[in-house]
Amino acid sequence: MSTPSTDRPSRPELLLIPAQIAVAALLAYWIGFNFTSLFPGYLPKIGALWSAISAVVVAQLTRQDTRRSASLRVLGTAIGAITSAIYLSLLPFHPIGMAAAIFATGVICASLNVPSHGRLAAITVLVVMVTASLDPALSPGLNALLRFAESCIGTAVAVVVVLLWPQRRGPGNSAAR
């Protein structure tokens, strides 16, 4: 007869991540909406959505994994925001240009030896470029900067929620991680 592993999460502990994600997404959405509302015409619902998405992406099972995910998110978002701002400063939105900017972010990430950041950089390019297509009058630099700031808001909220959330106790404790 086998004994249950003490390292396996209990049923209530399995609800930890969904609860953390829900709380982080709600807080990030609210903060992102209010932040982006400070900039008339810059689509606060997009800011709220981007902040919430960032919180969902960053929240992980352990504190250590959440911190690692946060650094990946911030650097990848910065690369994607800069690439799309440069593109949009030179050319208007076009789907082929968007694809070229996504390719450029992948090349930049690979050349910086952070290829795993490429996916998040590409997602940022998509958000910045599609936002620009919704309102071509938006300043490319401010649009990209806002998307970067909103991503940082969601990232910070996820880190704080995970750090403040009670961690599981006992053998296999991940609280110190």
Image: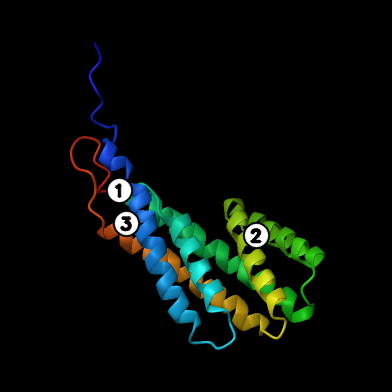
- Position of residue 24 measured from the top left corner of the image (x, y, whole percent): 37, 61
- Residue 20 position, x and y percent, is 34, 54
Residue closest to the eye, 32 or 87:
32
Which residue position holds label 3? 162
* Residue 158 appears in the rendering: no
- Which dot marks residue 122? 2
Residue 99: mark: none
For residue 108, side relative to residue 43 (left or right):
right
- The disc labelled 3 sits on which kind of residue? Val
**Above or below for 19 versus 6:** below
Q: Nearer the viewer, mark 2 or mark 1?
A: 2
Q: Which residue is at 24% across, 41% downward?
A: 173
- Per the model, the C-alpha gap separating discs 2 and 1 is 29 Å
Which residue in the structure is indicated by mark 1?
177
Residue type of the residue flagged with mark 1? Arg
- Check disc 2 and report its element: helix, strand or loop: helix
Q: Contact, CB < 8 Å: mark 2 with mark 3?
A: no
Q: Secondary structure at mark 3?
A: helix
**Between tags 1 and 3, which lies in front?**
3
Q: Residue at x 50, y 64 (%)?
A: 74
Q: Amino acid at mark 2?
A: Ala
Residue found at x 43% / y 64% = 155
Residue 3 located left or right of residue 70? left
Label 1 CA crowd tier, 10 Å (few <14, some 14–19, many 20+)? few
